[in-house]
Image (spheres, rainbow, N blue to C red):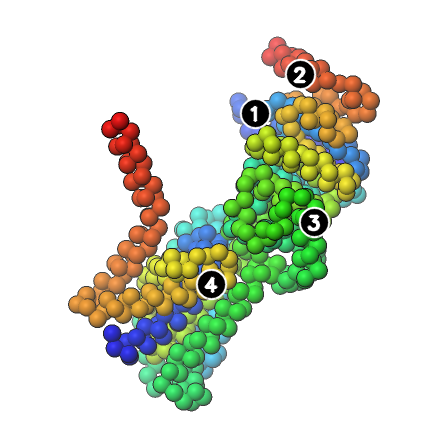
Amino acid sequence: MSLTAFLGAIELGLVYSLLAFGTFISFRILNVADLTVDGSFVLGAAVSAVFTFRGMPIAGLLLAVSAGAAAGIVTAVLQTKMGIQPILSGILTMTGLYTINLMVMDGKANIPLLNKESIFTYAYRVFNTEAYKIITLLIIVAALFAALSRFFKTQLGLSIRASGDNEEMCRASSIDTDFAKIVGFALSNAIVALSGALVAQMQQSADINMGAGMVVISFASIIIGSVIIKNKNIILGLVSVVAGSVIYRLIIALILTTNFPPSYLKLISSLIVITALSVPAVKNDMEMRKMRRRSTQC
Amino acid sequence: MLNIESVSMVFNKNTPDEHKALDNLCLSVAEGEFLTVIGGNGAGKSSLFNVISGKMVCDSGNILLGNENITFMPEHKRAAFIGRIFQDPMKGTAPNLTVEENLIIAYMRNIKRSIMSVPSKNEKNYIREHLAALNLGLEKRMNTKIGLLSGGQRQAVTLAMATLIKPKLLLLDEHTAALDPLSADSVLELTKKIVSDNNITTLMITHNISSALALGTRTIMMDSGSIVLDIGGSERNELSVHDVLRELSSIKNRTVE
């Protein structure tokens, strides 16, 4: 792997670790696979691109975050207040977002941002090195990591964690689980949208289909991370998400140096998630078979 | 303290399966009383707890706690001053949170302040001391995920959580029934100690008649959604397990006839 490819993989790993932070909140903390992500990622990118195109990249990031939070609130209200199944709530919001994303992008499937000012061009002028993208992303990831580590120790943060862990205990502990979930999904999708917004500015374009498969990619990162670093507490959990995301991108970069066509990537991501999630059940089954075989032999 | 005024609740109303879970039930509990509740399956004990805690809303009647009418108050709001412990030790604590985090959640439940606040060092010390008072050595495992503790230990932590800030009312729903005999005994001992040390108004459902008579200050027996026996004081002290069993089976026979 060339140095450029290696650094490129680190950049992608960092920017997508924000995506994984977001899905970590819904998937690991609230215990719901939230499919809104495929839509809110594009929503963030679309909002960011529209404003970057008009020369307002920072406003683009901030508005992308609010738009993502709004998408998360919709999903959470569907499942808490309207009694729609969690998975379906996400699918409904994601599907609806496709139209909204197209509206944001003024009906165009793609917004190119070549030669536009973005936070990365700002950063290049400040840091004045070739590693400006990595430095910028490191700062953002570190800031978000610090904020989230602190947040999940606060009363609200603990309430959100407990809501995903044991709802009955929450109600007995005077926690409004609906409110906690709404805040959790809003936060999750706001971070996902931030990730999309940064990807758009970094890759200098936003595309209506750039969100396809994002949920699975982020799950793969989370799972790889949890294999490497045991999630003993919430802080290690967040560290493992960043590590997993970077390693995932390095694996992909390695695969791309071979003769695999890039179109295989989604299949590979799916296979990683399937393998990781099925290991306990398959292991159990094999042990049972072994025991049965041994007992018939005697 | 707790006043339940002619509360009724019917399941599957107007169907052949209609079942009166609570039938015009009246109960008055004074401050500091420790009531044990016995009765067969389906007698309405858990329904009584559910309407008090707000898990279910009764069809008619009123529930007053102190001077407040809580009949229609949402469950999570009542939980601020009603402590509740379930039979299943897995239900009272969040397994992926640490012992300390679980206790912090319980501690913060009736302290009004910013939702973005973090407990101070003093508060953490108070929480640790409260847990240390159980004499189970759990204060050394504050950073352990609670899912790694045994059922008895989890139930003890749940008890500590429910009483961390003195509740107006403590509801114990067969909270030792799922434990092994030794753990059950130790959790019962803890219950006795905590309730009497803090003078907490308590209702405890149990199927163990000898502990129903040994613990607390008053015993009620329920059947078909109403109270059929309500004794306290010297009369209760003279009652034997045998008497209660006889009473229970006579009620059973009556309903069969």
Identify the residue shown where x is 48% and y is 78%.
Answer: A59
- Farthest right residue in view: B234
Q: Is residue B27 left or right of residue B178?
A: right
Give the distance between the C-alpha atoms of the residues marked 2 and 1, in whole angstroms. Answer: 28 Å
Label 3: few (<14), some or many (≥20) within 10 Å? some
Task: Assess whether mark 2 and mark 4 are in contact (beta carbons under 8 angstroms).
Answer: no
Give the mark nearest the N terminus, 2 or 1. Answer: 1
Label 2 marks a residue whose chain is B
Q: Could you tell me which secondary element the residue under label 1 belongs to?
A: loop
- Farthest top residue in view: B257
Task: Assess whether mark 1 and mark 2 are in contact (beta carbons under 8 angstroms).
Answer: no
Identify the residue shown where x is 48% and y is 61%.
Answer: A236
Give the mark nearest the N terminus, 3 or 1. Answer: 1
Return the mark for residue A238.
4
User: Where's residue B206, x and y in %?
Assistant: 65, 28
Label 1: few (<14), some or many (≥20) within 10 Å? few
Give the distance between the C-alpha atoms of the residues marked 4 and 3, in whole angstroms. Answer: 31 Å
- In terms of depth relative to the viewer, which is nearer, A47 or A13? A13
Return the mark for residue B130.
3
Label 4 marks a residue whose chain is A
User: Where's residue B98, x and y in %?
Assistant: 56, 52
Mark 2 belongs to which amino acid? Answer: Leu
